[in-house]
Image (spheres, rainbow, N blue to C red):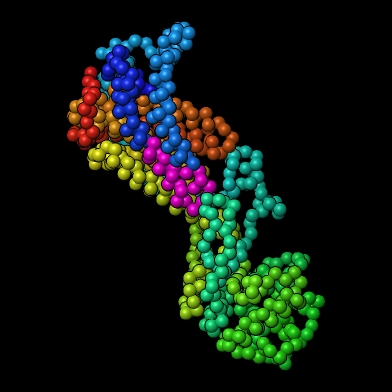
């Protein structure tokens, strides 16, 4: 709309509407295209996030921005033309032009508006006069805030906040819940190694409720002797890892049902159990009711290996070299446990509908807690990867299923931390790259593109640095905000850069003055209105509204300051003196 008002000064009050609209679209379309495309790309970059909610949010916002751009090029101009040709001619629509904000007061085509004259005669000369101090001050400030932005911490709480920290509901989750037994999230994590199942999410990545389906590996086979021994060794490695392993039989509540089977319930090593069972001499086997026996932990395992009285699957050498005998003994042991152990939940040997051994699991209790700091869990995760890799080396030659061996645990919070830290910066990097491409294609000027992108980097660093100083952590909401920071920071820079290149006189200081005269009002108005919108959001109790409002305010402040007080002086020093975009039909004067 500001370009529409400026068209009167350029073309005169009596200019045909078609010519005025053509000039407006010519001047505004390029900068709107840059800002819309870069903002949409910033949101769309979240589509590469492994977090489904971020993917959906990013794509939705990108579509909104693109639709808004096309509406600004089609619907809004149509409304302006309808108003100019119809409504404006009827006095009833505007009885008093002085009190009607949308009535155009006749303007002398040779005169500028007071705000445009201020930007041309006061603001532009001063920033050009102080260009070197401004570049030094804002450059140093951006460097300091850039360092602060690298100090952004991963989340320290696994709770997803909906309200501010001083809200009673959040105070309970963040400070009080662990003081109540029923609400405590302090628990030791169980690690579960899974074999024979594809370790891939084959569900719909855009649907958070689609968990996918289990797909077994067709070549899964644990009968080779080296694989049997490697599976026993996993148990040995875990128990020797004193910084990871905790004996579940020392921590189990003995009043719980089946607590005496802690070595087969809270911890399970199926191949080790099979080894103990098949190597028991046949003369030592007996038939008793293990559920009524007075045993606990290891003594129950010792008792289980002796039952039932049998002449097969006993007195064997381990590993078992005969695949048929191995499979038969696995079936017998599984059936024995199912028939003799109350509340039987499986021994880790999993069969498909046809009775084929299709998967194998082994799990252990660890001394790591769900809420341990990220660095501790990262070391924990690395140790588990090392155990998995050692097993794959020992069992090499057993088939391609070894490549799909994976482990699961209560690592949701750790994975969220890792995904957020990687995803946020990847999204920001993609946004920077796309902004560079768009600026380069539209401006077709390397110097202007580099200056613009450098300014955008300074804005983003200043915004993120401010968020760090305010105590923000990299959680889901913060990840969304950081990923779109590039898109929201590019607007003012793109408008000014586009206007600079449209200057009819290709001299640095003259082009800067023209840029300030034509775009200074629009940029300032946009900054104030967006800042005010963010200001009212910070009073919300909902955390997202508060944080996004604060982010909008900081983005507008730094975007306006760096665009006008850093980029403009840079253009006055090293700006391009020969633009590639030329005005062929309209060449408005600076004066």
Q: Is residue 33 above or below residue 21?
A: below
Q: Nearer the viewer, residue 22 or 226?
A: 22
Decide whether the magenta segment is chiefly helix, strand or loop.
Answer: helix
Q: Was residue 41 drawn as part of the magenta stretch in this picture?
A: yes
Q: Nearer the viewer, residue 133 or 43?
A: 43
Q: Residue at x 23, y 18 (%)?
A: 591
Q: Nearer the viewer, residue 90 or 515?
A: 90
In this picture, residue 551 sits left or right of residue 138: right
Q: Residue at x 42, y 25 (%)?
A: 76
Q: Nearer the viewer, residue 28 or 386?
A: 28
Q: Is residue 580 above or below residue 261?
A: above
Res 519 seen here: no
Question: Which residues lie in the magenta part?
Answer: 36-59
Residue 25 on image: x %, y %:
33, 27
In this picture, residue 389 sits left or right of residue 216: left
In this picture, residue 209 sits left or right of residue 73: right
In this picture, residue 34 sits left or right of residue 156: left
Residue 341 on image: x %, y %:
75, 74
Residue 465 on image: x %, y %:
42, 42
Q: Was residue 279 drawn as part of the magenta stretch in this picture?
A: no
Residue farthest bottom in this picture: 283
Q: Residue at x 62, y 86 (%)?
A: 325
């Amino acid at each position: 709309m500001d370009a529409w008002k400026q068209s009167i000064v350029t073309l005169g009050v009596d200019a045909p509407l078609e010519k005025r609209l053509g000039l407006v679209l010519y001047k505004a379309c390029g900068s709107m295209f840059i800002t819309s495309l870069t903002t949409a790309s910033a949101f769309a970059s979240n589509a590469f996030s492994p977090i489904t909610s971020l993917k959906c949010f990013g794509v939705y916002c990108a579509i909104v921005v693109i639709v808004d751009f096309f509406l600004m090029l089609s619907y809004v101009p149509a409304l302006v033309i309808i108003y100019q040709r119809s409504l404006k001619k009827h006095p009833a629509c505007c009885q008093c032009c002085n009190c009607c904000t949308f009535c155009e007061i006749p303007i002398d085509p040779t005169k500028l508006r007071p705000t445009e004259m201020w930007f041309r005669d006061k603001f532009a000369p001063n920033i050009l006069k102080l260009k070197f101090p401004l570049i030094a001050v804002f450059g140093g400030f951006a460097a300091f805030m850039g360092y602060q932005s690298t100090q952004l911490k991963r989340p320290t709480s696994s709770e997803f906040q909906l309200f501010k920290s001083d809200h009673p509901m959040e105070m309970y989750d963040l400070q009080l819940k662990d003081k109540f037994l029923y609400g405590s999230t302090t628990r030791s994590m169980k690690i579960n190694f899974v074999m024979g199942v594809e370790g891939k999410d084959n569900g719909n990545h855009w649907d958070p409720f689609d968990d996918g389906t289990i797909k077994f590996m067709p070549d899964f086979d644990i009968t080779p002797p080296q694989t049997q021994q490697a599976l026993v060794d996993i148990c040995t490695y875990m128990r020797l890892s004193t910084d990871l392993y905790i004996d579940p039989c020392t921590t189990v509540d003995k009043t719980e049902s089946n607590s005496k089977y802690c070595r087969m319930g809270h911890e399970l090593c199926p191949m080790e159990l099979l080894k103990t069972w098949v190597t028991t001499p046949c003369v030592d086997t007996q038939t008793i009711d293990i559920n009524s026996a007075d045993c606990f932990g290891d003594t129950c395992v010792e008792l289980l290996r002796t039952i039932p009285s049998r002449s097969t699957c006993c007195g064997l050498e381990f590993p078992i070299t005969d695949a048929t005998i191995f499979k038969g003994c696995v079936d017998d042991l599984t059936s024995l446990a199912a028939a003799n152990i109350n509340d039987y939940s499986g021994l880790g040997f999993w069969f498909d509908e046809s009775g084929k051994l299709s998967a194998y699991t082994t799990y252990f209790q660890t001394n790591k807690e769900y809420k341990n700091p990220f660095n501790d869990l990262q070391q924990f995760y690395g140790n588990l990867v090392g155990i998995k890799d050692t097993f794959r080396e020992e069992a090499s030659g057993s088939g391609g299923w070894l490549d799909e061996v994976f482990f699961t645990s209560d690592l949701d919070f750790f994975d969220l931390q890792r995904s957020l830290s990687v995803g946020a910066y990847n999204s920001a990097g993609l946004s920077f790259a796309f902004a560079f491409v768009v600026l380069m294609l539209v401006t077709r000027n390397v110097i202007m593109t580099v200056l613009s992108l450098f300014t955008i980097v300074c804005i983003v660093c200043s915004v993120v640095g401010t968020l760090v100083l305010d105590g923000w952590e990299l959680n889901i909401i913060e990840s969304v905000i950081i990923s779109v920071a590039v898109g929201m920071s590019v607007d003012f820079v793109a408008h000014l850069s586009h206007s600079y290149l449209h200057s009819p006189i290709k001299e640095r200081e003259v082009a800067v003055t023209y840029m300030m005269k034509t775009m200074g009002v629009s940029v300032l108005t946009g900054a104030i209105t967006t800042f005010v919108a963010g200001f009212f959001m910070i009073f919300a109790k909902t955390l997202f509204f508060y944080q996004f409002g604060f982010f909008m305010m900081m983005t507008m402040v730094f975007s306006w300051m760096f665009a006008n007080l850093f980029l403009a002086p840079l253009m006055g020093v090293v700006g391009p003196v020969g633009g590639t975009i030329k005005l062929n039909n309209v060449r408005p004067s600076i004066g």
